[in-house]
Amino acid sequence: MKKNVSAAGRSGWPARLRALFPFCWRDFGVCLGLLLLAAALCRLLRLFDESDVFVALIFELAVVLVSRFTTGYLFGVLASIIGVFGINYIFTYPYYAFNFTLSGYPLTFVVMLAVSVTVGTMTTQIKQQEKLRAEAEKEKMRGNLLRAVSHDIRTPLTSIVGGIDTLLESGEQLSPELRTELLQNIRDESGWLIGIVENLLSVTRVSGAGSIKKELEAGEEVLSAAAMKIGRRYPDIQISVRAPQELLFVPMDAILIEQVLINLMENAIQHGVTTSRLEIHLSRRDGSAVFEVADNGQGIAKEAFSHLFEGGFTHINTGSGSDVRRNMGIGLSVCQTIIQAHGGTIEAENRALGGAIFRFTIPLEGEQYDDPGKDPRH
């Protein structure tokens, strides 16, 4: 038994080493390019100052950048060693020759190597911790969403099954009005389940790809598409769309952003209690595209704002108190996930004249979209 454990431990070491010191040609190119750039910068600065006090600092910076933009420890450590030997060979007299016999230089060599390796290793560890923190946040989001869905999904399923059983067993004995009511209830609950599935697919689309694929899309077209879908589902709701006169192209996943807009509008209709009108706006502000969904309902209870995007249940103002409605938090949690994946922010507030407004931003990532007569995708 001990031999098996020992053998398993030995076989695991190569895998651990490969994980800690992975090699790929892309990282090799990054390492080589940054070291050559550091050497070139040092040669350029020596034209203005023959002292070498800045050389070590520039190579230290190169080591940090290599550790930041490569995977694992391999190239950070390699850059540290190459940097120290490179300084000795190129920038220490006699030039273009190794000389470790200068007074005090062996100690300087060891200290600089230790500092370079330490800085590179710490940079790599910080990067890995950031990655682990992002993964933890993603897992937390998934867990919150799944808990919210599993907690509430039984109710519509039970209602659908109960309605179908009633129609199958006693359908002929029911009045036409009651049969119609049961069928409408089944349709409504089925529609809600479809919405849950769409939201789950949206989350899978965001988390499964690592990073979403953004393309330049006309923001007004996405607004109109979402408004048309909501208009077909809720024909009694008035929807107004407002966008800039010039065509505003936004880097985004159009399917996901359309889902965000649909979630926000459905949230306003289902939980605004008295909502009869929706206003969806698009504008440009401070280098970002700003989307707004406003309603004339009864707004959001103050105690709900602290956990509005966490999933599950949310308290909504009803005039006489607060009510607890399903699905609001689930949809809003998905919205936050999608917007954060786009590098944007989302927030909500109550309007002064009644109702609520949800606002989210998406960075435009430059001003290459300024020409309204030119579609930058072509």
Image: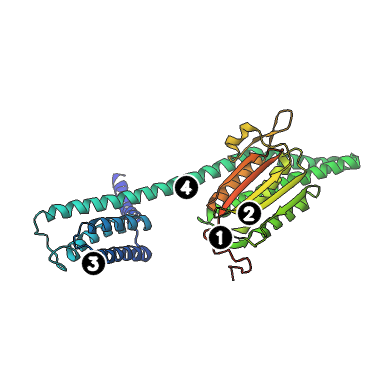
Residue 315 image point, x, y percent: 66, 33
**Front of the two marks 2 and 1:** 2
Q: Look at the numbered disc 3 and give the secondary structure of its residue.
A: loop
Dot placed on the residue nearer the N-terminal end, 4 or 3: 3
Dot placed on the residue nearer the N-terminal end, 3 or 2: 3
Q: What residue type is labelled 1?
A: Lys
Dot placed on the residue nearer the N-terminal end, 4 or 2: 4
Q: Which amino acid does label 2 sit on?
A: Ser
The front one of 265 and 295 is: 295
Q: Look at the numbered disc 2 and give the secondary structure of its residue.
A: strand
Q: Distance between the residues labelled 3 and 2?
A: 50 Å
Above/below status of 236 relative to 307? below
Q: Which mark identifies residue 47?
A: 3
Q: Look at the numbered disc 1 and give the secondary structure of its residue.
A: loop
Q: Distance between the residues labelled 4 and 3?
A: 47 Å
Dot placed on the residue nearer the N-terminal end, 2 or 1: 1
Q: How far apart are marks 3 and 1 (CA)?
A: 45 Å
Q: How far apart are marks 1 and 4 (CA)?
A: 21 Å
Above/below status of 42 relative to 354? below
> Circle 1 is placed at which residue position?
214
Residue 59 image point, x, y percent: 26, 58
Residue 74 image point, x, y percent: 30, 57
> Circle 2 is placed at which residue position?
283
Quadrant where the C terminus lies?
Answer: bottom right
Dot placed on the residue nearer the N-terminal end, 1 or 4: 4
Q: Which mark identifies residue 135?
A: 4
Instruction: Please rate how many residues cluster around mark 3, counting C-alpha atoms within 10 Å: few if below 14, some from 14 to 19, many from 20.
Output: few
Instruction: Please rate how many residues cluster around mark 2, counting C-alpha atoms within 10 Å: few if below 14, some from 14 to 19, many from 20.
Output: some
The front one of 159 and 317 is: 317
The front one of 163 and 248 is: 248
